[in-house]
Amino acid sequence: MANPCILVFAGSIRTGSFNARLAAIAAKEIALAGAEVTLISLADYPMPIYDGDLEAASGPPENAIKLKRMMMAHPGVFIASPEYNASITPLLKNTLDWISRVRDGKEVPLAAYKNRVFALGGASNGQYGAMRSLLALRQVLEIGCGALAIPEQIAVARAAEAYDEMGLFKDEQNTQRLRNVVHRLIDMARQFA
Ligand SMILES: Cc1cc2nc3c(=O)[nH]c(=O)nc-3n(C[C@H](O)[C@H](O)[C@H](O)COP(=O)(O)O)c2cc1C
């Protein structure tokens, strides 16, 4: 079976973001596992805060349409999700919400979330490593959008100390955990490729 292409992005555009670093390591591990990878930054897809009036007047923003089509072109998606007040960032929620509103032609609603598989990771400087953000993201994806997300996930605790100067994990356990997530994601994504 052909190797699938996996889309990777983080829910933070902060300079030096712990989650952008996690996304970068995930992308590297995906490539090492022999799959193709597309690593993007949401900084390149700015969009206004969702507003029903805006949508009624002009439809979803161009960047939401672009991102939605990009998701459709990838059978696997890895999201590195920061934790804000025990949930996901407004940037990530807004992006996922706008994508959920894009419908090309007569396709089913929420098409970007169907027929592909998601894997979740998160990094925070706290001891739980964005774990609550992963729970919230799982709710949005699985319950809200009807997506399939694999149970394996990675929560990188004490993120300020977790990465070395090369941007890799200092702790082998984190590397192994991420590898496990990524390998399962690729295996599952193959079924949708
Ligand atoms: C509004 C706000 C709320 C936050 N709430 C949490 C939280 O509930 N749990 C946590 O571990 N960190 C929390 N943090 C700290 C973030 O984990 C930290 O800013 C982290 O660097 C964000 O991810 P990033 O490095 O990828 O940008 C919060 C930060 C902000 C700005």
Image (cartoon, rainbow, N blue to C red):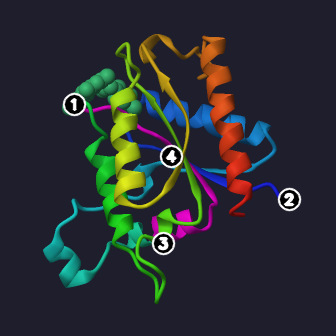
Q: Do residues under tags 4 and 3 come within 8 Å of each other at their CB atoms?
A: no
Placement of 186 over or under 85, stated as above or below: below
Q: CB at mark 1 closer than 8 A to ligand 1?
A: yes
Q: How far, Cα to Cα, is label 4 from label 1?
A: 21 Å
**Helix, strand, or loop for circle 2?**
loop
Where in the image, quadrant-wise, is ligand 1 located? top left
Q: Residues within 10 Å of mark 3 (few under 14, many from 20)?
A: many
Q: Quadrant of residue 49?
A: bottom left
Q: CA distance from mark 4 to mark 3?
A: 19 Å
Mark 4, residue position? 9
Q: Residue at point 41% right, 79% down?
A: 103
The residue labelled by disc 1 is 85
Three-letter residue code for mark 2: Met
Q: Residue 116: name its quadrant.
A: bottom right
Give the numbered dot on residue 77. Answer: none
Q: Are marks 1 and 2 in contact (CB under 8 Å)?
A: no
The residues colored magenta run 66-84
| C-alpha separation, residue under disc 4 versus residue under disc 2 | 25 Å
Instruction: Work out whether mark 4 precedes mark 3 in sequence or the reverse, and give the earlier one.
Output: 4
Q: Is residue 31 above or below residue 155?
A: below
Q: Is residue 22 left or right of residue 59?
A: right
How busy is the neighbourhood of tag 1: few (under 14 within 10 Å), some, or many (20 plus)? few
- Labels 2 and 3 touching (C-beta < 8 A): no
User: Which residue is label 3 attached to?
Assistant: 111
Q: Nearer the viewer, mark 4 or mark 2?
A: 2
Give, as a three-letter code, the residue at label 3.
Answer: Ala
> Relative to 39, does residue 101 appear above or below in the rendering?
below
Secondary structure at numbered mark 3: helix
